[in-house]
Image: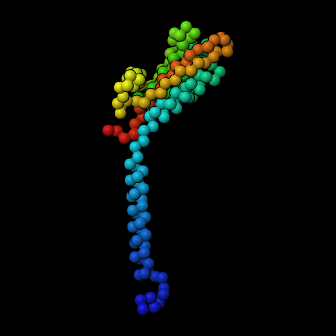
Amino acid sequence: MLLKNKKGDERYLSPVNIIIWIIVGVAVIIGASIFFAVQGDSRKIEATTLRDKIVDCFSENFDYSEINKTDFDIYAKCSLNKNALNDYDIYYFNVSIKNSDKKISKSISGGFGSFAVLCSYQEAGKDEKNFPRCSKSETRIFDKKLNQEFELLVLAASNNMGNAIKE
């Protein structure tokens, strides 16, 4: 009989260990290949998040006289990271405020300015894979001090290709 001793020592467990290690190794390789095969593009989500943050910032206690000051800092007011938005040429935003005459009375922008042109191309239906993804919003806001309604136009764009596959 092959197993007279019935001890579970190494000579009988080695083949089982090798089979288990092979199964674990194949599972890790399959899992990693599935994970890295997924193409993720978060540019539209980032643009929408930036737009929503700016809209929320302006919508809460809107004060046109504060915004119209020459030393108004949108980065401090809306808790935006100035370095991240301006230094890497991957984000853009434009905030326009229209008065009751439908004329733009105040415009604030930041980030990589050429994205505005690329966003207008997207609106016209001329979209490329490497164009930034844009998000636009038109919202009515009310200034209680002036007792006046304004229209807030926000355009935000992201071309953060960190998670996207570049082709």
Q: Give me the residue at 42% from left, 81% from top.
A: 12
Q: Give me the residue at 38% from left, 48% from top.
A: 37
Question: Does the rendering let one see residue 73?
Answer: no
Q: Position of residue 106 (x, y in %)?
A: 53, 13
In this view, which residue lies farthest toward the front?
125
Q: Give me the residue at 40% from left, 30% from top.
A: 132
Q: How many marks?
A: 0
Work out whether 135 lies above or below 63. Answer: below
Towards the viewer: 151 or 79: 151
Work out whether 3 lies above or below 48. Answer: below
| Picture quarter with the N terminus | bottom left
Q: Give me the residue at 41% from left, 89% from top.
A: 2
Q: Position of residue 31 (x, y in %)?
A: 42, 56
Q: Position of residue 149 (x, y in %)?
A: 61, 13
Work out whether 1 lies above or below 124. Answer: below
Towards the viewer: 46 or 74: 46
Specify the color scheme.
rainbow
| Picture quarter with the C terminus | top left
Question: Does the rendering let one see residue 125?
Answer: yes
Towards the viewer: 44 or 162: 44
Q: Position of residue 95 (x, y in %)?
A: 51, 20
